Image: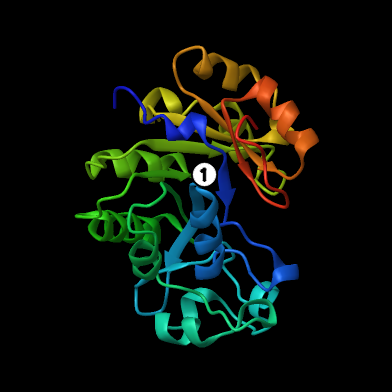
Amino acid sequence: MGDLPKWLTAVPIAHRGLYDLTAGIPENSLPAFEAALRQGFPCELDVRFSADEDLVVSHDADLPRLTGVPGPVRAKTAAELGALRLNGTGHGIPRLTEVLDLVDGRVPLLIETKHAHPLEGRGIEAALLRQLRGYRGEVAVHSFDPVAVFRLRRLGVRVPLGQISGLLPKADPVSRFLGRSLVGNFVTRPDFLSLELAALPSRAATYWRDRGRPVLAWPVGSAAQARRAQQLADNIIFSGFVPSSEH
């Protein structure tokens, strides 16, 4: 899509917001995004469908880790998810529209699409582009699924589009090979790559980086990891510490 916005490579990105459970701020919550706003960090976040096909901000497909409630996110409405308590705090799972209203263009957003199966992803991607229509802030979108990246291209996405990959230990052997090799990039032509720090260095990542696709390393959880990432990538997606401006 031509020149990428500078923030993608110049400013460390807060993974699921600037969360800190010791301070009562859970991941992917409105307070986590507010905390990132106060320090000027772009925010990475995850979106998936609720039962009523609203986009909600949740990394996990299932609820127990964050809420202690059994069952999948997809089984509850956005209102029901908002009423749940994240990690025993007073905060619930927000709608994407709530995050957009809160951020209101003050920092950029990096949004990952999440889905349980490919057909569901098609609806999520279309819903995401509808909700971003008219949003005045800077946004980029990325996904683990190269088919999702391809569909977003076909839907006419007008923001930077990225391919996520990593070691993929839970994937089947074929999917793991395809993901690590980034061979789908020849078809989908992502604008940037989001790669697991543990998977770097990577010949595939170097190939695409040499061809103008910057690499964002994740998850970066310490100053030592940030120093390693600085040698292997163009920016970091961080959590668990607050990096310096030079990361």
Return the residue nearer the eye: 57 or 89.
89
Q: How many marks?
A: 1
Tell me which colouring the rendered structure shows: rainbow
* Closer to us: 174 or 194: 194
Furthest residue toward right: 224
Residue at the limit of the structure toward the left, as seen here: 134
- Location of the C terminus (image quadrant): top right
**Amino acid at the residue labelled 1:** Phe
Q: Report the residue at 30% width, 40% height from top.
A: 159
Identify which residue is drawn at 47% across, 82% down: 82
Vertical arrangement, residue 8 with respect to residue 142, above or below: above
Q: Is residue 142 above or below residue 52?
A: above
Residue lying at the far top of the rendered structure? 210
State the image coordinates of residue 163 (x, y, percent, origin top left): 48, 36
Q: Which residue is mark 1?
A: 144
Q: Percent position (x, y) of residue 97?
A: 34, 68
Q: Residue at x 49, y 81 (%)?
A: 81
- Above or below residue 186? Residue 195 is below
Q: Position of residue 105 (x, y in %)?
A: 33, 52
- Depth check, front residue: 178 or 9: 9
Q: Is residue 51 left or right of residue 206?
A: left
Q: Quadrant of residue 152?
A: top left
The answer to whether 164 appears left or right of 191 in the picture is right
Q: Quadrant of residue 217?
A: top right
* Classed neighbour count for the residue bearing mark 1: other residues with Cα under 10 Å, few (<14), some (14–19), many (≥20): some
Which x, y percent locates residue 200? 69, 27
**Residue 130 sits above or below residue 68 on the image:** above
Picture quarter containing residue 29? Answer: bottom right
Residue drawn at x 41%, y 29% is 6
Report the quarter where the N terminus lies. top left
